[in-house]
Image (spheres, rainbow, N blue to C red):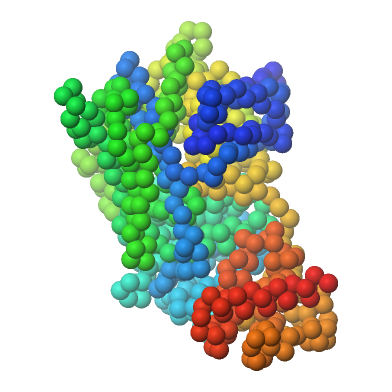
Amino acid sequence: MNSCTYSVSFEAILLMPHDITVVRSESDTYDVKFSTEGKKSAEVKMTSTFKPDHDLQMVIQMSGQLSSFGICEPGDPGQTGILSKDCLMAQFMPNFSEFEDLQEQRNEVYFVVDRSGSMEGSSIEHASSSLLIFLKSLPAGCRFQIIGFGSWHDCLFQEPTDYNETSLERALQYQREMTANMGGTEVLPALKAAFDSPLSGQGWYKQIVFLTDGDVSNADEVIGLVSSNVGKGRLFAIGIGEGCSTNLVSGVARAGRGMAAFIRDNAQMHGAVMKILKEALQPRASEISVKWSVTKKSASGTANPVNVISIPTKVPPVFAGRFLTMYGILPEEGQFAELSGEVVLEYEILGTKYSLRIDMASVQLHQSQPDKTDVPIHRLAGKCQMTELSDKYKAELMRDPEKSKSDEAKSLRSQIEQLSCAINVLSIFTGLVGVDPVKQEIPAEAPAPAPAPPPMFCRSMPIRHYMCMAKTAPRVVGSAGFGCSNMAASIAAAPRSAGFLGFGGKKKASKSVLFGRSRVAESAAGACVRESLPQSAVSREAPLIADATGEVDFEEKKSVESPLLKLVELQNIAGFWNLVEDLAKCINLSLDSLQKLQPKTWSASYSQAVTDRVWATALVLAYLHSKLSASLDEWELVGKKAKAWLIQQASMFEKSPPTAKKLVDGLIEQAKLVVNK
């Protein structure tokens, strides 16, 4: 390939709910210019020369804790459709702190693991050890199933089985013998088996954890399957390595109303699996709704309700500590300044109703500069609506493949194509094609495609040189930018082209940067969409970044030391450990010294003896907190299970729950003195 000189520039507008205190980066330098006296908004410009050997990123610190907030972006009167209307973005931050120690009851937990040939080596080894931690972290009272898949699939049990010592031992034998010996990657039959398995009874709910490192040719069919079965349970997906399909993993998690995680290095797998399991087991929010209680004063002073169009039409699932994002399109241009009222998120957890409110008076206005036409919030809203329509289309085809010719399918496809061309964002039916930057026209014949470049962190091109193209056009390399500038034209539907990531190697912008306006090279685009980008273009050295959709990329870190896995293996199903030689070796102390330092009673005020099991369990918890705190994600559920067992033991003689908890905390503090010697 011929080399060429290039440069990358980056600018962004930040809109935050609290004053911005610091904008920094470990690799790049930014100039920050505050737009308001309160420092809630700022213009950021990269002043250093960017080298594509790392992700383009920034850390934004604020004076207050990130909480629910709203932004309004005025429409462009010169445009039509969604771009001409004012657009509200409401970001809700749920808080489940009072349910921190509670878990969902009557769960059927499925672990669907890829055992195809591509998983051979460290991938299957880490998947196996992750399954060990997964199994030991399951709560009492649940039922579980393991499904391995490749060219075929097999289920460990005939149906989900009660979590007990017998079933756990059988599952652990499966875990020890698990290999990557099942050929190709046939996802659809495995997930269909999980969804088709009858529920254990009324009130039971499926939580499916799906782990894969591959790509499939029928991703749309798989996503359609999940979407058509969403009433039966939630699906959480984990993508492994560079060859994993982000379209598949993100798509099934979104359709399954769960979460997606992507890991770059196999050593991160333990933490990823346990984070996902923690989300699956937290109390589930139901009866979720968003109400736009917005009014506009008439000339006579009467407050009249405004009919806000809500995007998406179906409210996304609620997860603790993760933004729930909704968009509202106002029916008329220029209405924002005259509006009052609030946007309300309501949901129910364990029979108790909760609500989060965003007052219209607190909503910030994002006004594009006079010479700019980028409208990132409108494009995000359009992308969200387009994704929802695409999922409906896939679910329609999954129920009946012949329905591709039905009026409903044709209508959905038409809406997707029109919306994609209007906002210049790729869809399942449209692509991007190069345009001559001088003549502003499509070449009569597209040149032969160049050889595929080697994996790279970033490749940037002026997005204004691209336009949406019809399906009959030759397939060419396009851009994964979030949209074209005002110089681009739009025509309907092409097969998706290979994409370039506009800036950096991240799959998505960070949560903080997502709400701003970014400009890459000559582009006036609002953000980057990267569904078609192969995972090979992603940096291996990316930090933890979570976006508003709940997708997470895990930063690379050292693999877990063997003592953690050994301790997990030694834990009893009830949550306790026995005071034995193997345990003493794991925490680097002799069994004799641990026995000599064992307290006789729980405290001076109680005569009840501290048993070997109680002392061993306290020692392990002390060791985990003192020595393995950096791996909290991996052992948190195991630790909670152990602490719950200790509290249960203390409750046998101390009936006050707070006092019993204090006794346990005191015993763990004594144990810390021992393990930290």
Dividing the image into 4 quarters, which one contains the N terminus? Answer: top right
The spot of residue 282 in percent (x, y) is: 46, 63
Report which quarter residue 586 is drawn in: bottom right
Q: Out of 28 and 351, give the one closest to the viewer.
A: 351
Q: Out of 329 and 415, give the one closest to the viewer.
A: 329
Left or right: where does residue 252 sit relative to residue 632? left
The spot of residue 205 in percent (x, y) is: 37, 68
Left or right: where does residue 649 sit relative to residue 4? left
Left or right: where does residue 5 sit relative to residue 221? right
Dividing the image into 4 quarters, which one contains the C terminus? Answer: bottom right
Q: Residue at x 49, y 60 (%)?
A: 97
Q: Out of 48 and 441, give the one closest to the viewer.
A: 48
Residue extending farthest left: 300
Q: Residue at x 38, y 59 (%)?
A: 285
> Is residue 431 positioned above or below 98 on the image?
above
Report which quarter residue 470 is drawn in: top left
Q: Residue at x 47, y 73 (%)?
A: 144
Left or right: where does residue 268 sit relative to residue 18? right
Q: Residue at x 63, y 66 (%)?
A: 635
> Is residue 193 positioned above or below 457 on the image?
below
Q: Out of 38 and 275, give the one closest to the viewer.
A: 38
Res. 601 in view: yes
Residue extending farthest front: 605
The spot of residue 571 in percent (x, y) is: 64, 79
The spot of residue 232 in percent (x, y) is: 34, 63
Res. 132 in view: no
